[in-house]
Amino acid sequence: MNLASIPSPSTAVWHLGPVPLRAYALCIIAGIILACYVTDRRMRSRGAPPWAVLDVAVWAVPFGIVGARIYHVLTSPEAYFGADGSLVKALYIWEGGLGIWGGVAGGAVGAWLACRQLGITFTFVADCIAVGLPLAQAVGRLGNWFNNELFGGKTDLPWGLQVHVMSDENPGQALTGPDGEPVLMPGLYHPTFLYELLWNLGVAGAVFALDRKFKFGKGRAFALYVMLYTLGRGWIEAMRTDTATMIGGMRLNVWTSIIVFLAAAAYFFLVKGAQEFLIPAIDAEGNPAKGYQSVTQAQYEAFQANGTRPEDTVVAPAKPAESDHATDEAEHKSSTSTRE
């Protein structure tokens, strides 16, 4: 055993009686719980009711898991549609194989549906989850460590990863040699799962700090998360040695990272808007209504202080030198801006 290396678990599945406890699934669940907690704190601080994030998660999580699995299956077709593949294994998500791009897309659809039910703007939720999501991804990568997967090429660096040969007949367990010890692959390998884990933690910290300083709105905090994540995923993906679909000499996920980065960057720089806060909605008669109204921070603080709603904002009178037409136009613009 090389002391200057990172060991890998030889077991990824434990049994509690007849019930299998899979490390990969446990890591995914732990990541979801952490993301919900962080997102709830961010949503509450901006006016959402306590644990509204759970109403979003009920839709977003299953949609995200299905989307992530579909993306993985479609981008790794040989394992499921090839000569030696098995289509039924597309259902075996506990063995690993969740594509982040499909997960984000599917989760976004689920979150959008939840937001429509709750009467909350989708971009509000997207910006609030922009810190919790990379934290969830970081925790989820530990599942790849347990599964002895997603490692890179050989290395002699001190943090090289030991990788076990996992059994096909006994899923979740390493093969054992004649001496009864788990069998290791020769040499050490780049722990790309760990690189991405650390990168995701950095992304979460960067989004939190920059959002706190610049107060991004209208989904721009989420776009920032996507930009930062894809920057790291591109070079980390290029280090991996597992089988992948290749296009033009590059792995498909590298191309996807480039395309998604450009789309997120375009959104980030083209879309403008103040950070969103929520106040309870009312109907035309002023009675409480289902859902929430999206307002600016100043409008939210005014509502918290004395119940003043944007519709109640008094328009400042025009300067005496202005004409009646200019006064009417200024009042119209000011009234319109308070309703945005």
Image (cartoon, rainbow, N blue to C red):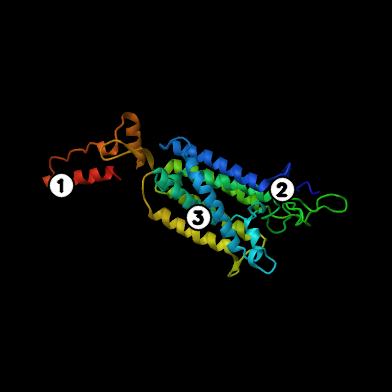
The mark nearer the N terminus, 1 or 2, is 2
In front of the other: 265 or 29: 29
The mark nearer the N terminus, 3 or 1, is 3
As drawn, the label of residue 12 is 2
303 relative to 56, above or below: above
Say whether residue 261 is visible.
yes
Residue displayed at 45% across by 40% down: 212
Mark 2, secondary structure of its residue:
loop
Mark 3, secondary structure of its residue:
helix
Residue position marked by numbered label 1 in the rendering? 326
In front of the other: 121 or 335: 121
Q: Residue type at mark 3?
A: Ala
265 relative to 122, above or below: below
Residue position marked by numbered label 3 in the rendering? 105
What residue occupies the far right of the structure in this picture? 179
- Does residue 291 appear left or right of residue 147 in this picture? left
Q: Position of residue 17 (x, y in %)?
A: 74, 41
Q: Position of residue 32 (x, y in %)?
A: 56, 44
Residue density around tag 1, few if under 14, some if 14–19, many if 20 or more, within 10 Å? few
Residues tagged 3 and 1 counted as in contact (Cβ below 8 A): no
Residues tagged 1 and 2 counted as in contact (Cβ below 8 A): no
Residue displayed at 56% across by 40% down: 34
Residue displayed at 44% across by 49% down: 113
Dot in front, 1 or 2: 2
Say whether residue 216 is visible.
no
Q: Position of residue 65 (x, y in %)?
A: 56, 52
Dot in front, 3 or 1: 3
